[in-house]
Amino acid sequence: MVKVEKQQGLDIQVERIQVGIHDRVFSAVRNTLVTLTLLATLGGIAQSEAASIPSSSSTVAPLQDSVVTSARIDPATFTVGDPVRYILTVTHPAGTRADLPDVRKNTGALEVLAYQVHRDSTSSGQRVDTCTLTLAAYSVGHDTLPPQRVEIRPLSTSVDTAARLFYTTATPLFVRATAPANAKDIADIQDTERLSGVVPWGLPILFVLIGLLILLYRKWKKWKAKRDARPAPLPAALVVSPEDTALAHLRALEEAGLIGSSNPEGPRLFAFRLSEIVREYLAARFGIDALEATTSELLTRSAPLPLLPEQHVWIGEASVELDIVKFATGVLSAADAMRLLEGTRCFVRSTPQPNPSTPDSPAALSERNVAE
């Protein structure tokens, strides 16, 4: 029984030793693999850096010597708020490129108003880049523009190599105020010389009087122009009786040349005009609506008029005869035209003149017709 227990203890110890040896071997192999991986990574990085570095170290010194930078401000002393030019010049080899990445953000207290870059080449094959900034200062006193960083890179390589850095010199400047330093506030202004006790009031009074005279003269000129432009009063209108008006129209119709005219429309025009004269006379003389009335309406409206029986008959016969010529293109000889013209003239002259106070006046007749 004791031997069995000893044999089991020995087996357990042997198993523990084997497990420990196995763990140590596994750890050593793992550490070796990690070390080899790190060495391979570092070797690749070293090769890429070696490829990015130029093959000849002799190019660094000529590049350093051939790059020239300068900075100046024109003018160096200026008034606050005035624009000034800040000029940066970089001279570098033809196969390189010059960049000023931070120039517009590196002007100190001055504000950038404009920015312009001009690139040119010299006879020796170098390139000259001129960067001109328009600046303005809004605080007075001494100030200094900080150095500007210049990055130089070759143009021939496709790989973005590390830039060679150069810096311009700091640029001092002075901003003067718009007013002199000893200027006082406006409230401190005092008169250096007192006015004399005698004030020349005569001259201002003379100027005032002259101005008043000029003003009065202009007012008078405007009033005179309006008075001259006023139209002269028209003479009083002459009161013409309906009888005189009708006789004048009949005379004008007789002289119009329509009687016995060779114009085919002459008789018809004569009839229309003579009918209008009769109707206008009746309307003006008795106040009836005769101009737009038909023949039947005219006879009805003229029936109550204070006319002689033969005058009523003449109005009816003349109206019918004229209507035949006007609307039925009837024939009207020169003798018939003169007969009608003379009949109308006799009718007008034989009509009794009304008394305005009598019921037969035009006004009374007009009111009577409206009432009817």
Image (spheres, grey):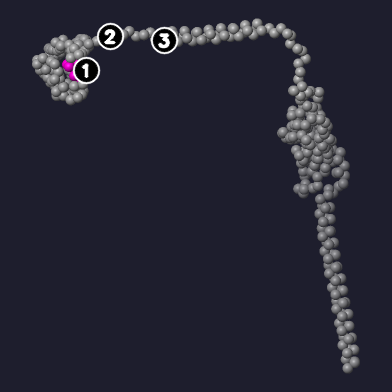
Q: Residue at (20%, 24%) from the top-left corner? A: 370
Say which quarter of the image contains residue 71: top right
Say which quarter of the image contains residue 356: top left
Q: Residue at (21%, 21%) from the top-left corner? A: 367
Q: Which mark is first along the chain, 1 or 2?
A: 2
Whether residue 125 is visible to the viewer of this picture, yes or no, is no
Say which quarter of the image contains residue 163: top right
Q: Residue 205: x, y in percent?
A: 63, 7
Q: CA distance from mark 2 to mark 1?
A: 20 Å
Categorize mark 3 by other alpha carbons within 10 Å: few (<14), some (14-19), many (20+): few
Mark 3 lies on residue: 230
Q: Which mark is first along the chain, 3 or 1?
A: 3
Q: Do the residues bearing badges 3 and 2 touch, measured as CB atoms within 8 Å?
A: no
Residue 110 or residue 163, whichever sits in front: 110
- Residue 238 is marked as 2
Q: Is residue 200 left or right of residue 360?
A: right
Q: Residue 320: x, y in percent?
A: 12, 21
Range shown magenta: 359-366
Q: Say if the magenta span includes residue 224.
A: no
Relative to 19, is 35 above or below?
A: above
Quadrant where the image shows the C terminus? top left
| Camera-nearest label, 2 or 1 | 1
Residue 86 or residue 279, whichever sits in front: 279
Task: Give the secondary structure at mark 1.
Answer: helix
Q: CA distance from mark 1 to mark 3?
A: 37 Å
Task: Give the secondary structure at mark 3.
Answer: loop
Q: Residue 34: x, y in percent?
A: 83, 66
Q: Which mark is first along the chain, 2 or 3?
A: 3
Residue 170 or residue 249, whichever sits in front: 249
